[in-house]
Amino acid sequence: MTPSHRLLAAGLGASLCLAAPAYSQVKKQGHDIAQLKKAALAIDKHVANLYRRKKLKVPAVVDDATFLRRSFLLAAGRIPTLDEARMFLEIEDANKREMLAGYLMSEKNDGYRSSMVNWVSDLLRLTDSFNEGQAAPYVEFVHTAMKDNMPWDQFAQRLLSAKGSGWADNNGAVGYFIRDKGMPLDNLSTTMRIFTGERMECAQCHDSPFNKWERMDFYELAAFTNGQEEINRGPWNQVEMELRDAKERRTEFGRLVEWLGDNIHYFTLAGGGKGRIKLPHDYQYRDGDPGEMIGGKTHFGKKIRSSERRDDESARDDFAKWMVGKDNVRFTSIIVNRMWQRIMGKGIYEPVDEYKPADKTITPDLMDYLIGLMRDDLQYDLRAFQHVLLLTRNFQFAANPEAFEAGMPQAFNGRQIERLSAEQVWDSLVTLVAGNPDKLPRRGFSNAIYYKGRPVLVGKKTMAQLSREVLAIKTPDEYRSYVNQLLSEVKGGGGKPTKKEMMAMKGLQRPGPASGMARASELPAPAPAAHLLRSFGSSDRDLIESATREPNMAQVLSIMNGYVEKMVVSNQSSAVYKALEAGTTDRDKVRFLYYSILSRSPTAEEMAILMRDVIDGSKESYRNLASALIATHEFIFIQ
């Protein structure tokens, strides 16, 4: 190893440290690297047994460059920087793949958080607003949960049991039900699909012809979450009705009343679920009558019931506990399968969110092992579980055509080549422009009152305070009086902000960093229709995981002569051009550009062609090379 390589190795040892202290969240839960490696080895043994049963040779592993790029894109959602690529590719260390997995899964590495925010936001259809109102506390809850590596069972339970005002301290989880305000039955279908892999949409209207679910089953589950109401909406309703009758809704007073309805009352959830529900007027089966009141009942896992005779204010809490309980194997199986798909490319069973019992999968023993690992050993620590998967040989497999022909599932036969997600494309471009994007500013979350697109009463009153005051109002007269006073306070703050107010406003960034140069997780959600993220298929957040990787002409134009050209290639301050400063010879500069963009060295043939026909030492020749590399399929695909 050369002296320069020794320095790089020292850097790798410091930066890609796999020691338990760098992984403090796992350490706190009693997980150390030895435990994770042992679990990875157990998984590989199950996969090897599968190959043995199929009488197939276990695939070879990919080379270092492929492993590097694959690991970064899946674990951190972006390509590695030049320094990160050099640290990995230019050292010889038998443990460097293990070290890289530790680096990517360290809680000090923000890439994991950002990537998981994107994933769970698509799953939950997370948006920056509800109807016409703000959803910032809900968005903040999701961001914080991913940053803190909140165990998945705790995360789900918080979402399903939250109640009260979304503006109350640490109560943003109430946004899960607010997201589907007015559609509680659709919300139940979504909940069952996300967390149990049960498709119950059809059973909302009739017995499902495709699975075992009957309409009565659906309504017995819906009883637990029935009764979703807003807190103390009565006085507001009366005032709003009077304004409508008097045709005064467009007055300053009327607009403020409307704003309070959208931003305060709308973001509340009263009660804990009635635990009972009326069958619909068109109920058509013999096991119930239209309009009949029925109680709640679960149909798998631990059997729980609620009474049809009285409201039960703990019904949603009971439902949440049932959902994440150890008896509900579906809850664990689905998140195991989702995480396997995230890392390996395909789920152990497909579709990834249609539950299959372990004994119906191709690897029953492995599925049982993974369920126990997630639930009992790792206690729903998704970071630790994905860390285990990164340590497996299965993750490193190169695709083997012979195995495909023999019917080996994609989940155990290397990753299929596929285009990067919109978020991976964007974050990789940001990496080329700004260097390590995890050092860029994150979006800010504040409790400030935003009215007509600007913060008001800064340093005087917060949304939490406003919410408490508004929700405590008991009569329409009191409500009118309060709104008049609030309107006066807002107008009174219309002059030049005080120094105190300016300091309080500093750092408030809604809904994302003002410059736009930030990771996808920090930008408005969903992205505007004209944004590069949408061109590359990011979700509009209307449906669960509705992102697409389908090609279109807008993508080609963005890369060749549009957004990418302006954002990266023509931007001489782009971090990608630091490769030219790092190299002392033309060959070094070419190699470092390849490191920066494709995360590999050029082949001997590529280098020969470039040195002969392209590179003449000018900045223009390197700019042309950078443009060409970004435009390759290799840049926007992962394998």
Image (cartoon, rainbow, N blue to C red):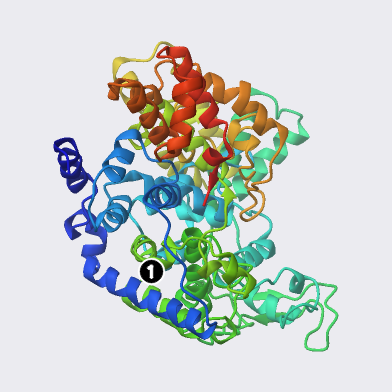
Residue occupying image coordinates x 53% and y 68% = 411
Q: Return the residue nearer the eye: 543 or 13.
A: 13
Tell me the element at label 1.
Answer: loop
Residue occupying image coordinates x 66% and y 53% = 543
Vertical placement of 498 versus 5: above or below?
Answer: above
* Identity, as a three-letter code, of the amino acid under mark 1: Tyr
Residue occupying image coordinates x 76% and y 31% = 246
Residue 506, given in percent of the width and then of the height, sits at 34, 24
Q: How many numbered discs?
A: 1
Q: Quadrant of residue 155?
A: bottom left
Left or right for 278, reference 392: right
Residue 458, given in percent of the width and then of the height, sits at 38, 26
- Asked whether the viewer can see residue 629, the reply is yes
Residue 145, given in percent of the width and then of the height, sits at 39, 54
Vertical placement of 154 versus 488: above or below?
Answer: below
Of the 4 image quadrants, the one containing the N terminus is top left
User: Dot 1, how many residues are within 10 Å of its Cα: few (below 14), some (14-19), or many (20+)?
Assistant: many
Determine which residue is flagged by label 1.
380
Left or right for 582, reference 213: left
- Asked whether the viewer can see residue 568, the reply is no
Q: Return the residue nearer the eye: 364 or 312.
A: 364
Q: Return the residue nearer the eye: 241 or 197.
A: 197
Q: Quadrant of residue 49?
A: bottom left
